[in-house]
Amino acid sequence: MEGIEVLQEFKILENGSSFITKNFAKLQIQYPNKFIAVENNSIIASNQKVEDLISSLNSMGKELGKILIEYIPEKGIIILY
Amino acid sequence: MKFNLELSEVPNSERIFLNVLSRQPHSFGQLKAILDTGSPKTIISYIDALRLNISISGAETGEPIAGFGKGQIPSKKIKKFIFTLRSEDSTIKYVEMPVHVVDISLLKNMSQEVQNSTMRIPTIIGLDFLRFTGLKLVIDLKNHSSFLE
């Protein structure tokens, strides 16, 4: 049972991650310097402050472990981590 | 066993991602991590520590983390953190290894500039992950392919 649940969660994760990667250039135009929250291949919230974004998601009753949050840098900057 | 990686080829944002699940008790959830061979250690980001409510109470103080950003980021070291990986043929692999986690409470005492730059850094899978799992990293940019095996 755990195995099936894990595989389903991987599918959701991989879809969300792929959505961000494939749309990254567009996201840089739409959400520069913001944190975005992704669920079911769509942006459900965004904010310049990650704490405020997480508060919004909590208010929406979202399960945070199943939502990806990513910072979107503005276009034209080389980001080194 | 082969574990596919996600290759982002957006100009100036080329990255290799490893999607894993945290199976740490009370902190189950998804992690989209950058595979970074320039990092000796695996580091759970500020966002993911906050999002998954990862408990660091009782964890030993980790070495501060420094990079290109300003200041040093405080961390805690969790000796046994549980990840799961999915192989190409959908086999689940559990990995239990030490990780560093950004210390959220100490970070809040630091300058706003350090806080802001730290919050933007994603979770990083470092060289210790490759050493610990024994997996080899293969990157073939010409053929848009990257995986662990």
Image (cartoon, coloured by chain):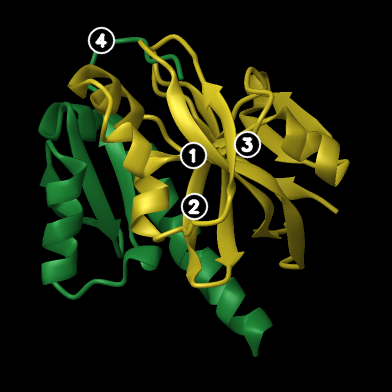
Name the residue carrying label 3: B42
Label 2 in the same subunit as label 1: yes
Mark number displayed over residue B123: 1
Q: Are marks 2 and 1 in contact (CB under 8 Å)?
A: yes
Share a chain, discs 2 and 3?
yes
Marks 2/1: CA–CA distance: 7 Å
Q: Nearer the viewer, residue B117 or B143?
A: B117
Q: Nearer the viewer, mark 2 or mark 4?
A: 2
Amino acid type, callout 1? Thr
Mark closer to the observer (4, 3): 3
What residue would you read off at disc 4? A76
Of callouts 2 and 3, the N-terminal one: 2
Colour used to depict chain B in the structure image:
yellow
Q: Residue at x 42, y 50 (%)?
A: B49
**In whole angstroms, how far apart are the C-alphas of marks 2 and 3?**
12 Å
Tell me the subunit letter for badge 2: B
**Callouts 4 and 3 on one subunit:** no
Say which mark, if any, is on residue B7.
Answer: none
> Tag 2: residue type?
Leu
Q: Residue at x 29, y 20 (%)?
A: B114
Q: Is residue B65 above or below residue B122?
A: above
Return the residue nearer the eye: B16 or A60. Answer: A60
In the structure shown, which secondary structural element does the residue marked by tag 2 occupy? strand
